[in-house]
Amino acid sequence: MKYFWTNTIWYIILGIASIIELTFGIINNKRKKLLLGLFISIVGVTVMCEIIIMADFKSYSYYPKILPESWQHFKLPHAEYYWHNESIIGNYFSQVSVSATAILLAARNLKFYWYVISIVLYCLVEELFLYLGIYSHNWYRTWMTFVGLIILFGVTKLIYMKSLKGNGRVLNFIYILFGLLGLNWFTSPGWFMYLFGVQTLTANLFSTPSANAASMYAGLTFLQGSIAMTTYFLKPKWWWYIIVSGFLFLQHYLLYIFNFNVFKYWWGFGVFSTTWIMGTWLQIYILDKLYDGTNKKSFRYAKWNR
């Protein structure tokens, strides 16, 4: 509670504003399921961008101060993990916020000047967060946010308009794949285990544990998501799901035995791999239902033998 009124409250306000925006954008729209699916996919896209520029290239950091500072020394295996998890939490608020705004602008078919107002407001909020010391830049600058939001809001509008007319199987595959990243980034059991020091990712792809963890989670999501999605949409016999799940489990096991994925307790590997695989199937099912019925050319009904 020490930093609640100086740091945390601002992120909570941002979160509440995001919920209001998303609700207002979806509530009176006949394509509610499609909009919710697109929102999750857009979150996945923004998360991917954040992984690249925040975790891998250390562009900026968030300081929501939600985690107790004592965890820096007692709960986590390395102090850098504490700041990484703090930034991840701040990242959650940021990505949900810009994605909700993108959906609101597209769903309400708002005029161009609303796009300009929204982008300027985000840049002002960014400068406010910098002034308050609850967010910091390294090499990143606010004008990059301005450019990035122009692209994000414009692309979201184009995707929404195209989706209303119907997407081909390739586009829907891509949307659902990014949706998996959007869902997995928020619900992954690995992040909670990583947060409490139960799991450590040791692949030395980058110079910091945070960049390694973020990149490995994203890579694993895309790899296993692609395999599971291909299986799901081919609609094979039930026993194929068992075979593919076994193959996904084998991938986790190889990461484990070669010490790319290290667990502090014996039960860590079983809990992580089982919940990850089951979660992947469930997330694909949910995303498919969100895109299904609102899209005449749904991937699920595409003919693979064309």
Image (cartoon, grey):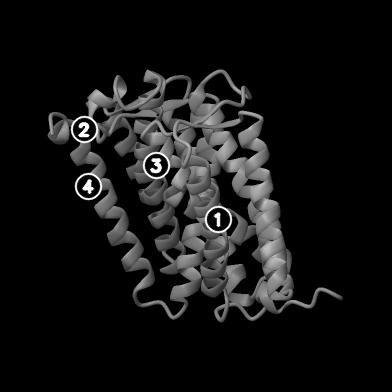
Amino acid type for the residue under numbered disc 3: Phe
Q: Percent position (x, y) of residue 141?
A: 44, 26
Separation of disc 2 and disc 4 at Cα?
Answer: 11 Å
Instruction: Indicate the position of residue 142 as horizontal and vertical percent values.
Output: 42, 30
Amino acid on which disc 2 is placed: Asn
Q: Residues within 10 Å of mark 4 (few under 14, many from 20)?
A: few
Which SS class for mark 3? helix
Badge 1 or badge 2: first in the primary sequence: 2
Mark 1 vs mark 3: which is more N-terminal?
A: 1
Placement of the C terminus among the 4 image quadrants: bottom right
- Secondary structure beneath disc 1? helix
Q: Which residue is mark 2?
A: 7
Q: Is residue 161 left or right of residue 62?
A: right
Residue at left offset 47%, top offset 60%? 39
Q: Tell me where residue 194 appears, x and y as whole percent.
A: 43, 35
Disc with the residue nearer the chain's start (2 vs 4) = 2
